[in-house]
Image: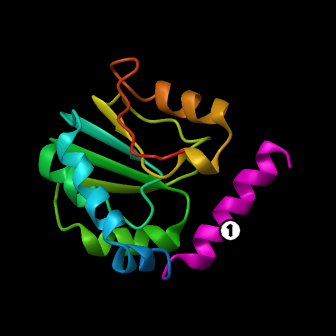
């Protein structure tokens, strides 16, 4: 499967599964524990969250950042993410992470459970064009 087809398949999946996506967090303590990893990461300043999904991580990032810009391609997951985060310092953006051109640079670029879904070259390109500090992209993706 080529990279474009892979990305299209992933986007279709997340749109279709938006309301069911968080069920494993209720089923598995390990996933709930993993959310606390954010507290150990060097999150600071203005944060860009790529592929924010349903916003599991967004409130935790917002608690430690000056601002958070949370980007995802699927309106369905963004609608859920908005209900999780009441912070006025969070801005949600519906955009294809691979095509989106950030209007500025960010102090921290964060993404979780994203690496296993996308072509490796696309990840480094998307992350590097957004960060003020090369190489500062804390992640929690297990793959």
Task: Give the image location of residue 109, x and y in percent.
Answer: 36, 35
Residue displayed at 28% across by 39% down? 47
Magenta span of residues: 1-19
Q: Residues within 10 Å of mark 1 (few under 14, many from 20)?
A: few
User: 2 above or below 15?
Assistant: above
* Vertical placement of residue 42 versus 133, above or below: below
Q: Which residue is found at the position 13% from the left and 52% from the top?
A: 63
State left or right for residue 76 relative to residue 68: right
Q: Quadrant of residue 22?
A: bottom left
Question: Is residue 47 visible in the rendered structure shown here?
Answer: yes
The quarter of the picture where residue 8 lies is bottom right
Give the quarter of the image for residue 24: bottom left
Residue 17 colored in magenta in the image: yes
Quadrant including the C terminus = top right
Question: What residue do we see at 67% from left, 60% from top?
Answer: 10
Measured as percent of width and height from the top left, residue 85 is found at: 23, 66
Q: Is residue 129 visible?
A: no
Is residue 130 in the magenta section? no
Report the residue that reaches farthest toward the top: 134
Front in this rendered view, residue 81 or 17: 17
Helix, strand or loop at label 1? It is helix
- Can you say whether 86 is above or below 4 in the image? below
| Image colouring | rainbow
Q: Position of residue 84 (x, y in %)?
A: 26, 71
Tell me residue 29's x, y (percent). Answer: 31, 71
- Give left or right: position of 86 versus 14: left
Task: Name which residue lies at 46% across and 46% down.
Answer: 141
Circle 1 residue: 12
The chief SS type of the magenta part is helix
């Amino acid at each position: 499967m080529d990279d474009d087809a892979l990305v299209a398949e992933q986007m279709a999946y997340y749109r279709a599964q938006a309301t069911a996506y968080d069920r494993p967090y209720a089923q598995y303590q390990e996933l709930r524990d993993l959310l606390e990893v954010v507290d150990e990461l060097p999150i600071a300043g203005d944060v860009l969250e790529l592929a924010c999904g349903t916003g599991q991580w967004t409130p935790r990032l917002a608690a430690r950042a000056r601002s958070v810009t949370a980007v995802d391609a699927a309106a369905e997951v963004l609608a859920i993410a908005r209900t999780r985060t009441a912070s006025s310092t969070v801005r949600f953006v519906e955009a294809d992470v691979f095509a989106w051109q950030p209007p500025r640079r960010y102090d921290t670029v964060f993404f979780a459970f994203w690496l296993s879904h996308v072509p490796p070259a696309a990840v480094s390109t998307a992350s590097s064009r957004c960060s003020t500090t090369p190489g500062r992209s804390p992640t929690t993706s297990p793959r």
